[in-house]
Amino acid sequence: MPAGVEVPDGERVVEWAPTPDGAAVATETALLLPGGVRLPWAEVDQVRWRRPVLVVDVPGRPPVRVRLSEPRRLPEAVRERVQASIVVSAYHRLGRGGGVRVVARRAGSGEPVWSLVYDGGADASDPATRAEAHGILGDVRAQTGL
């Protein structure tokens, strides 16, 4: 691992790759990026590798793009960590069109982090759509016992 990369105590490095600004580091709990950016796996929705850029989607913010000078095994390690964090993933159609994916991911605390990911056909700004999705979330939580 390159000098100057700060990994919090207790976090084990899984893989790393150089970037023009330093290094991107995958630990067991998060993706660490230059500039002190920390993306916990429980918050990452999707990862795409478009050589030489790793694109990380976190709901509620623009995609994070990381240019890797040499990818090493970082894209695969990040994808594996994101997939390993998923406890529940269930897609449901919505009455007003489109659908929502209900996702629970493991967090460092042990408690799952729940999220709703609306597809392009769903109007997430519509209060009735959001109420329906939250009702589905409640049903999934009750069914899984999480």
Image (tube, grey):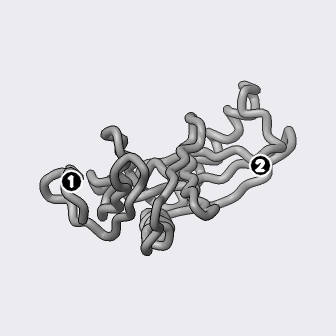
Assess disc 2: are there few (<14), some (14-19) or many (≥20) residues with their C-alpha within 10 Å of its C-alpha: many
Toward the viewer: 122 or 29?
29
The residue positioned farthest toward the left in the image shown: 9
> Where 41 falls versus 78 (above or below)?
above
Query: Is residue 56 something that shows in the picture?
Result: yes
Say which label, 1 or 2, has the lower sequence index: 1
- Kindly identify the amino acid type of the residue bearing the numbered disc 2: Gly
Secondary structure category for the residue under label 1: loop
Q: Is residue 133 left or right of residue 4?
A: right
Identify the residue shown where x is 42% and y is 54%.
19
Distance Cα–Cα, label 1 vs label 2:
38 Å
Identify the residue shown where x is 38% and y is 46%.
21
Q: Where the N terminus falls, by quadrant?
A: bottom left
Secondary structure category for the residue under label 2: strand
Name the spot of residue 11 as percent of width and height, x first: 20, 59
Q: Is residue 88 left or right of residue 22?
A: right
Name the spot of residue 33 as percent of width and height, x first: 37, 48
Toward the viewer: 143 or 30?
30
The tally of labels here is 2
Q: Nearer the viewer, mark 1 or mark 2?
A: 1
Q: Which mark, by number, is residue 127?
A: none
Q: Which residue is mark 2?
A: 99
Identify the residue shown where x is 43% and y is 68%.
74
Q: Are marks 1 and 2 in contact (CB under 8 Å)?
A: no
Assess disc 1: are there few (<14), some (14-19) or many (≥20) residues with their C-alpha within 10 Å of its C-alpha: few
Q: Which residue is mark 1?
A: 7
Toward the viewer: 36 or 81?
36
Name the spot of residue 53 as percent of width and height, x first: 57, 56
- Kindly identify the amino acid type of the residue bearing the numbered disc 1: Val
Query: Is residue 84 something that shows in the picture?
Result: no
Identify the residue shown where x is 72% and y is 33%.
124
Toward the viewer: 5 or 105?
5
